Image (cartoon, rainbow, N blue to C red):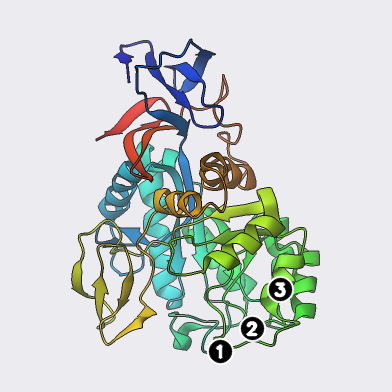
C-alpha cells in the first residue's frame, strides 16, 4: 500500500473490495474527494480498500462492559477506540435488560461521553436498548435477568430517552405484551427503530408488530425456545415478513450454516451481520470469571462457553470481520456480499451518510485489509478521513 499523508489530503492505493480494480482513493476534509482506477501490475500485491464496518449490537469489548455499572465516559471512549482495530467505524452501544435506574445511568453516561468527545460522537449511530420489554419465558429471554423484564411502558422509555439526550435510536422488544402495538406506534412516531427479539410472540402478534412499524429482527435464530412447532412459529414468521430486515450472528457457533443460508436467500439485501460482542471480545483465550459469578472458557477459535457445560454458549466474542470470514469461507456468499452485510447495508438501514460506500463525496470511513489465509486481517482503519488504527 502507498499512502501520502499531509495537511490537505491522504492518498490510499489498493484493490476495490467489490470490483477488484486497482484504485487510488483520496481523502480530504473528512470525505472521499477523489477515486479512480489505475492499471494493474501483476507483481504488486495490494490490500483491499472497503467501507468501514457498522455494528448494531456491541455490549462491550476488550474487558470493558456497557452493562456492568458503574460505567464511565472513559470506558465509552476506550471501547470506541478499541473497536477501530476490528475495522468498526460506527456502532450502537447496546444496553440490555437491567433495573430502571441502571438503564437510565448507563444511557446517561454514554450520551455524556458522546457530547464531550468528538471521536465518540462521530462513531456512535445511537444507543440500542435490548430489553427490558422482552419475553419472560426461559429460552426467548436468553441471559436477560427475569426479575427486570416488564411490559412496554412509554412513560418509562421517555425517562430513559431524556437521560440519553435522545440517543436511543433502536429498541428490541417482544410484541407478545398487550401494550406492545401502541408502544411500537409511539416509537415510530418518534423516529425510534423497533426490532423484534427475545420473543415468544404468536404469528399474529408478529404480523401486528410489523404493521405497526417494527422494521428489524434482533439476532434471529438466537434468544429462542430450544423446541418450536415446525410451523407456524415466530422464526418462520419473521423470515416471511418482507418489511423486516434481519440481523444474524455468523460466528460459526450461534447458528448453523444451513440457517445462515436460508436467511441470506430469503432476506437478500435485508440481511445484516452483527457481532453481539460481549465484554470479553478482544481478550486472549483462557478462563474468565464473569461479573455474574459464572466461570467461562474462551477458546482460541473464539468460542465462549460455560466452564461447567461446554455445550452452553456464554455469549459472542467474534467480531464483524470474523463473521465476514465465516460466511466467505463457508461459501454462503462472496467476500463483497459479506462485507456489505456488515457495512453498507446496516448504514443504509440506519440512514447513515456512509450508506453509499466507496463513492466520491461520502464520509471517508474506510478499512484497509488483507484476505490472508482465508481470513480478514485489518491493516488500517480511517474514520472521517483520519487514520485511527494501523497494524
Residue at label 3?
A: 236
Disc 2, disc 1: CB below 8 Å?
yes
Alpha carbons under labels 1 and 3: distance apart: 19 Å
Residue at label 2?
A: 200
Left or right, 153 with respect to 25, comes to: right
Q: Is residue 236 above or below residue 20?
A: below
Q: Earlier in the sequence, mark 2 or mark 3?
A: 2
Q: Residues within 10 Å of mark 1 (few under 14, many from 20)?
A: some
Q: Is residue 13 above or below residue 84?
A: above
Return the residue found at the far front: 42
Q: Provide residue 291's location: percent of width, then percent of height.
A: 26, 76
Q: Viewer-proximal residue, 306 or 351?
A: 306
Which of the labelled discs sits on residue 85, or is there none?
none
Q: Secondary structure at mark 2?
A: loop
Which is in the foreground here, disc 2 or disc 3?
Answer: 3
Q: Quadrant of residue 135?
A: bottom right
At a point 44% along the width and 28% down the height, the residue shown is 49
Q: Earlier in the sequence, mark 2 or mark 1?
A: 1
Q: Provide residue 313's location: percent of width, then percent of height.
A: 38, 76
Q: Viewer-proximal residue, 116 or 243?
A: 243
Q: Secondary structure at mark 1?
A: loop
Left or right, 350 with respect to 50, comes to: right
Disc 2, disc 3: CB below 8 Å?
no
Residue at label 1?
A: 137
Alpha carbons under labels 2 and 1: distance apart: 7 Å
Q: Which image quarter holds the C terminus?
A: top left
At a point 58% along the width and 66% down the height, the residue shown is 258
Alpha carbons under labels 2 and 3: distance apart: 13 Å
Q: Viewer-proximal residue, 327 or 100?
A: 327
Amino acid at each position: 500500500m502507498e499512502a501520502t499523508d499531509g495537511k490537505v489530503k491522504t492518498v490510499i492505493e489498493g484493490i476495490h473490495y467489490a470490483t477488484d480494480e486497482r484504485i487510488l482513493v483520496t481523502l480530504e476534509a473528512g470525505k472521499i474527494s477523489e477515486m479512480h482506477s489505475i492499471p494493474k501490475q501483476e507483481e504488486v500485491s495490494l490490500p483491499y480498500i472497503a467501507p468501514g464496518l457498522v455494528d448494531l449490537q456491541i455490549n462491550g469489548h476488550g474487558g470493558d462492559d456497557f452493562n456492568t455499572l458503574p460505567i464511565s465516559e472513559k470506558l465509552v471512549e476506550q471501547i470506541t477506540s478499541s473497536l477501530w482495530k476490528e475495522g468498526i467505524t460506527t456502532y450502537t452501544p447496546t444496553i440490555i435488560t437491567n433495573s430502571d435506574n441502571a438503564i437510565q445511568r448507563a444511557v446517561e453516561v454514554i450520551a455524556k461521553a458522546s457530547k464531550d468527545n468528538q471521536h465518540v460522537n462521530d462513531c456512535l449511530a445511537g444507543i440500542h436498548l435490548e430489553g427490558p420489554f422482552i419475553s419472560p419465558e426461559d429460552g426467548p429471554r436468553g441471559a436477560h435477568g427475569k426479575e427486570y423484564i416488564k411490559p412496554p411502558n412509554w412513560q418509562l422509555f421517555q425517562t430513559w430517552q431524556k437521560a440519553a439526550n435522545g440517543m436511543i435510536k433502536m429498541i428490541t422488544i417482544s410484541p407478545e405484551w398487550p401494550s406492545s402495538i401502541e408502544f411500537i406506534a409511539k416509537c415510530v412516531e418518534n423516529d425510534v427503530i423497533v426490532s423484534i427479539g427475545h420473543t415468544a410472540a404468536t404469528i399474529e402478534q408478529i404480523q401486528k408488530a410489523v404493521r405497526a412499524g417494527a422494521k428489524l429482527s434482533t439476532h434471529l435464530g438466537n434468544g429462542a425456545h430450544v423446541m418450536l412447532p415446525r410451523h407456524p412459529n415466530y422464526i418462520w414468521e419473521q423470515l416471511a415478513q418482507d418489511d423486516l430486515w434481519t440481523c444474524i450472528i455468523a460466528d460459526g457457533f450461534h447458528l448453523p450454516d444451513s440457517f445462515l443460508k436460508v436467511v441470506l436467500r430469503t432476506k437478500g439485501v435485508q440481511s445484516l451481520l452483527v457481532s453481539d460482542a460481549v465484554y470479553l471480545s478482544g481478550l486472549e483465550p483462557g478462563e474468565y470469571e464473569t461479573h455474574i459469578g459464572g466461570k467461562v472458557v474462551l477458546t482460541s477459535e473464539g468460542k465462549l462457553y460455560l466452564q461447567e457445560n461446554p455445550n452452553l454458549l456464554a455469549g459472542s466474542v467474534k467480531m464483524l470481520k470474523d463473521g465476514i470470514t465465516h460466511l466467505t469461507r463457508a461459501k454462503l456468499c462472496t467476500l463483497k456480499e459479506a462485507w456489505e452485510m456488515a457495512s453498507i447495508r446496516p448504514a443504509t438501514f440506519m440512514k447513515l451518510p456512509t450508506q453509499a460506500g466507496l463513492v466520491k463525496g461520502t464520509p471517508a470511513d474506510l478499512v484497509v485489509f488483507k484476505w490472508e489465509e482465508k481470513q480478514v486481517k485489518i491493516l488500517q482503519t480511517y474514520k472521517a478521513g483520519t487514520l485511527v488504527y494501523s497494524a
